[in-house]
Image (tube, rainbow, N blue to C red):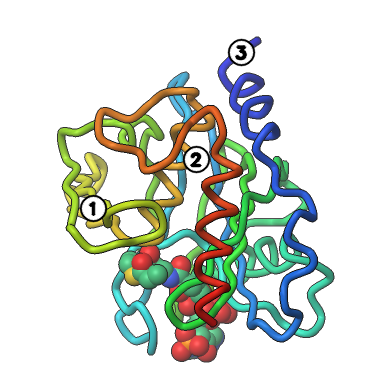
Amino acid sequence: MDLKEKAIASLKKHASGDAFSRLPAALPKASVLIPLLLRHGKLHALLTVRSVNLKHHAGEVCFPGGKSESGDTDETHTALREAEEEIGLPSHTVQVICKLFPVLNKAGLLITPVVAFIESSFKPRPNADEVSEVFTLPLEFFTKEADHSCYPVPSVFGPTHSFMYTDPRTGHIHQIWGLTAALAVTVAALALGKKPEFELGFDLDDPASAFRDVLNRRLSKL
Ligand SMILES: Nc1ncnc2c1ncn2[C@@H]1O[C@H](COP(=O)(O)O)[C@@H](OP(=O)(O)O)[C@H]1O
Ligand SMILES: CCC(=O)SCCNC(=O)CCNC(=O)[C@H](O)C(C)(C)COP(=O)(O)O
Ligand SMILES: [Mg+2]
């Protein structure tokens, strides 16, 4: 099996399917697309920098995504629609792999991560109202200690991860932290089948129970 097939097989084992379909329907929903691609023989992930003019998370690094709209058929539709709106990613070129367990953020928004492969030749067209920059980086970056630190503040799993990534193409330094870092670390560990050099916060052999526990703990506090 090549790198991409291995990643797909491994990620599919952790698909949440409809395991969370009985959650309160009234919860506001959002989706993020975690776009993976092959570049120079390695798995990469695509991230965006949010416009400084946005009301929420201005200037922060995040995956393409956003809130569910009434016309969306499901969480995957939301992720693909948002990615098309924000970075001009044509939905029909995307190979959706799976949905992971949703995460409930502090604002009570239920966020479903959708993992997908995109074409290596994809050229982003950022919508300047929402996205100021798009960059890709090797997925294994999120398994290394070198540019990683931890804040002793609880995030999705364990402490809050933070990474400083210097994009060799632009020289820009990007901080990736909080929810986005937690999702990136999770997908890197699952897709590469590799334990990070720092504490992951869940058992790589059985992430589904950790994801379910986190969600149930958050839901019980609603
Ligand atoms: N054309 C536009 N110009 C400015 N802001 C926009 C916009 N389209 C969407 N937004 C805002 O961008 C944020 C992200 O949208 P989305 O969920 O579609 O990704 C939302 O704000 P809030 O985060 O304040 O709700 C939304 O209102
Ligand atoms: C949970 C809060 C944090 O972790 S803040 C830390 C760094 N910022 C992020 O990880 C961005 C988190 N926010 C998003 O990904 C999006 O705002 C969203 C998916 C929650 C909603 O999308 P929208 O585009 O409507 O803001
Ligand atoms: Mg958005």
Q: Nearer the viewer, residue 109 or 55?
A: 109
Quickly name the residue at label 1: 162
For the C terminus, which image quadrant?
Answer: bottom right
Q: Residue at x 42, y 54 (%)?
A: 47
Quickly name the residue at label 3: 2
Residue 173, given in percent of the width and then of the height, sits at: 18, 53
Residue 169, given in percent of the width and then of the height, sits at: 26, 42
Q: Nearer the viewer, residue 25 or 149?
A: 25
Residue 29, given in percent of the width and then of the height, sits at: 64, 76
Image position of 208 (left or right of 21): left
| Quadrant housing residue 168 | top left
Image position of 64 (left or right of 177): right
The disc at residue 187 is: 2
Amino acid at circle 1: Ser
Q: Residue at x 54, y 55 (%)?
A: 213
- Regarding mark 2 in the picture, which secondary structure is present there? helix
Residue 91, given in percent of the width and then of the height, sits at: 73, 56
Amino acid at circle 2: Val
For the N terminus, which image quadrant?
Answer: top right
Q: Residue at x 51, y 70 (%)?
A: 218
- Is residue 202 in view? yes
